Structures are given as structure tokens and as C-alpha cells.
Amino acid sequence: MKEKTSLDLTQDLFQLMKQFPRPKLKQSSCDELTRSEYELLVMLVMKITEDNKALTATEISNLLQITPAGVTHLINPLEEAGFIERLNDPNDRRVVLIGLTDKGTEMAEGLIAEVQEKLIGLVNHLGEEDSKTLIRLMSKAIEYFAVQFGT
């Protein structure tokens, strides 16, 4: 049997990545959100702490790796829908902070629970050893792309 060349492997990998399905989430209220909007909500619930109840648009921009204008584009509909709120920074009146409302926290926590459920299913499907191998290989791939794209 002929060994696959790097080009063959690259083509196989590309075809495989194209087949990766986007997860369909059960939460019906998620239907009103774009993928980027629910990623913002999830990121906020994961980054907000007891001491730090909100983030600046710049912090969000850096975490999501999008422009500040892109953050504004995401924030406006989420604020209108009641998922987030703009807050004044008590230390600097010029700075606006972005925080989650109770509705936003509930939505984000529900989304996280659904994704965790799907990942538990994947781990059960693959088994412990293959799951560890997948994690190791994906980590190496992320390191590679971080160097290649300077992230």
C-alpha cells in the first residue's frame, strides 16, 4: 500500500474539517441569537466573577478576537433583547462596562450545559484513551495555528 503524501493528508484533513457539523442547540430562545451573540454571552458568564461583574468592550474585543466595532455590533441586539446591560465604570466615567442580566446569565448557563452534555457524549463515544489523544492532538493543532496566525 502506498504511503500518503503530505498533500494527500492535507486534502483528507480539509475534507474531514468541512464535514464537522455545527452543533444544533435545543434551547428554543437560542434561535433568536446568532452564533457570535451566544459566544459572547457564554464568554461573559465564564469571565465575570464576584469581584469583576462586567467587562469593557476592549476586553471583550480581545477575548473574542474581533474589532471594537464588531463588539458594538454584537452588544446592541443583545442589550435590546435584555441579555446584557451597559454599566458605568465607577472608577472612570468615560468607560462603559458590559454585564449580563439575569436573563443573559440563564441563557449562557443553559448553552454551556447543552455543550457539556454533547461533549460528555463524545467522550463516552470515543472512550478515555481516544479522548485524551484527541485533546492532545487538538492542543498541538491549536499551538501550530497560533504560531502561524500570530494569535
Image (tube, rainbow, N blue to C red):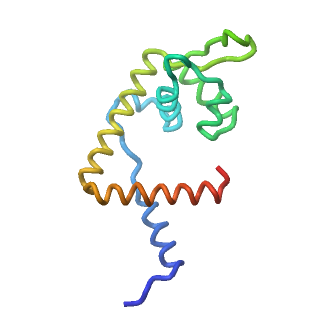
Q: In the shown orientation, is residue 17 left or right of residue 85?
A: left
Q: In the shown orientation, is residue 106 left or right of residue 151?
A: left
The one of 100 and 127 positioned closer to us in this rendering: 127
What residue appears at the point 34 percent right and 31 percent down from the top-left corner? 27
Residue 23: image location, x then y, percent: 38, 45
Q: Quadrant of the N terminus?
A: bottom left
What residue appears at the point 49 percent right and 78 percent down from the top-left corner? 8
Residue 41: image location, x then y, percent: 49, 28
Residue 56: image location, x then y, percent: 65, 24
| On screen, residue 15 above or below 37 | below
Q: Residue furthest right?
A: 94
| On screen, residue 14 above or below 146 | below
Number of residue marks: 0
Residue 145: image location, x then y, percent: 59, 58
Q: Residue furthest bottom?
A: 1
What residue appears at the point 52 percent right and 78 percent down from the top-left corner? 6
What residue appears at the point 40 percent right and 54 percent down from the top-left corner? 135
Q: In the shown orientation, is residue 121 left or right of residue 39?
A: left
Determine which quarter of the picture holds residue 95: top right
The one of 49 and 149 positioned closer to us in this rendering: 49
| On screen, residue 41 above or below 36 | above
